Amino acid sequence: MAAAVGAVSGATTTAAQAAPTASHRAQPPFSYAACLDAAKQHGESRSCAKWHCDLLVTKGRVRPPKR
């Protein structure tokens, strides 16, 4: 019984440590230019790449472009 309790408490601390912090998610990791470059490498047209990157901006995965 003591081993089962230790296993449960160990799993709880591991899950808490794996959770992302607020500061980690404060700024999206990729620039808009990097998104366009990646889309180009995948063979997307310029208009499709722009649409795709704009979608990722709305989801918060790409920083908005500097216009």
Image: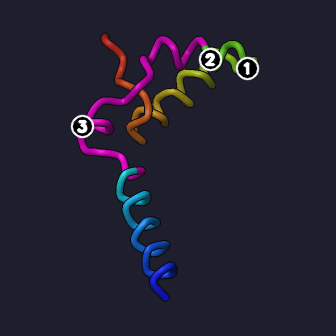
Q: Residue 14's quadrant in the figure?
A: bottom left
**On screen, 45 above or below 1?**
above
What amino acid type should be assigned to the residue bearing mark 3? Ser
**On screen, 18 above or below 67?**
below
Decide which of 31, 65 is in the foreground and name it.
31
Per the image, is 36 magenta? yes
Q: Which mark is residue 22?
A: none
Image check: 8 left or right of 38?
A: left
Q: Secondary structure at mark 2?
A: helix
- Residue sitting at 73 percent across and 20 percent down? 42
What amino acid type should be assigned to the residue bearing mark 1? His
What separation in Å lies between label 3 and label 1 (alpha carbons)? 31 Å
- Residue sitting at 36 percent across and 30 percent down? 28
Give coordinates of residue 57: x percent, y percent. Answer: 41, 32
Q: Which residue is mark 1?
A: 42
Magenta part of the chain: 18-37
Q: Which mark is residue 23?
A: 3
Give coordinates of residue 41: x percent, y percent. Answer: 71, 13
Residue extending furthest front?
A: 2
Asked if marks 1 and 2 touch (Cβ < 8 Å), the reply is yes
Q: Secondary structure at mark 1?
A: loop
- Residue sitting at 53 percent across and 22 percent down? 50
Q: Which residue is mark 2?
A: 38
Give coordinates of residue 65: x percent, y percent. Answer: 36, 17
**On screen, 59 above or below 5?**
above
What amino acid type should be assigned to the residue bearing mark 2? Ala
